[in-house]
Image (cartoon, rainbow, N blue to C red):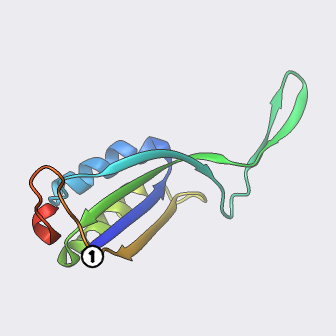
């Protein structure tokens, strides 16, 4: 089992969710986050004063999946979140040791 975490631009969330649903991902967790990478933020003008916005709004999408779905999930996220511009985000893949469904007590892949 794998945990796929993608940090993407907020306006791409619906496309990513639809792409993951289309390949059979049954559940995702979405968190609004702030951060920066190579973008390094940007400057904005507010009431005549210029200030630096260091942290840009992003969305973190997490999905626990079966290992055999990994390539499909990565491809779906890459295609749906890509704008071709800097700041499109990143995908992180980590190993999941155990998953437990609280309601039923199911464990492992059955709990996904």
Percent position (x, y) of residue 104? 9, 54
**Considering the image in quadrants, where does the C terminus appear?**
bottom left
**Considering the image in quadrants, where does the N terminus appear?**
bottom left
User: Could you tell me which residue is drawn at 48 percent across and 43 percent down?
Assistant: 10
In this view, the residue in front, 45 or 36, is 36
Mark 1 Cα shell of 10 Å, populated few (<14), some (14-19), many (≥20):
few
In this view, the residue in front, 47 or 5, is 5
In this view, the residue in front, 25 or 46, is 25
Asked if residue 55 is positioned above or below residue 40 in the image, the reply reads above
Q: Quadrant of residue 74?
A: bottom left
Percent position (x, y) of residue 22? 17, 54
Percent position (x, y) of residue 44? 79, 36
Residue, disc 1: 71
Asked if residue 98 is positioned above or below residue 23 in the image, the reply reads below
Is 39 displayed left or right of 23 in the figure? right
Q: Quadrant of residue 95?
A: bottom left
Is 14 displayed left or right of 9 in the figure? left
Q: Secondary structure at mark 1?
A: helix
Is 38 displayed left or right of 64 in the figure? right
User: Could you tell me which residue is drawn at 63 percent across and 53 percent down?
Assistant: 35
């Amino acid at each position: 089992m794998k945990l796929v975490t993608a940090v993407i631009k907020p306006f791409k969330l619906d496309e990513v969710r639809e792409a993951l649903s289309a390949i059979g991902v049954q559940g995702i967790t979405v968190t609004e986050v702030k951060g920066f990478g190579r973008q390094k933020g940007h400057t904005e003008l507010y009431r005549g004063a210029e200030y630096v916005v260091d942290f840009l709004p992003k969305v973190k999408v997490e999905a626990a999946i079966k290992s055999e779905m990994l390539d499909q999930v990565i491809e779906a996220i890459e295609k749906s979140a890509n704008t071709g511009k800097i700041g499109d985000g990143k995908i992180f893949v980590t190993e999941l040791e155990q998953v437990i469904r609280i309601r039923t007590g199911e464990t492992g892949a059955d709990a996904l």
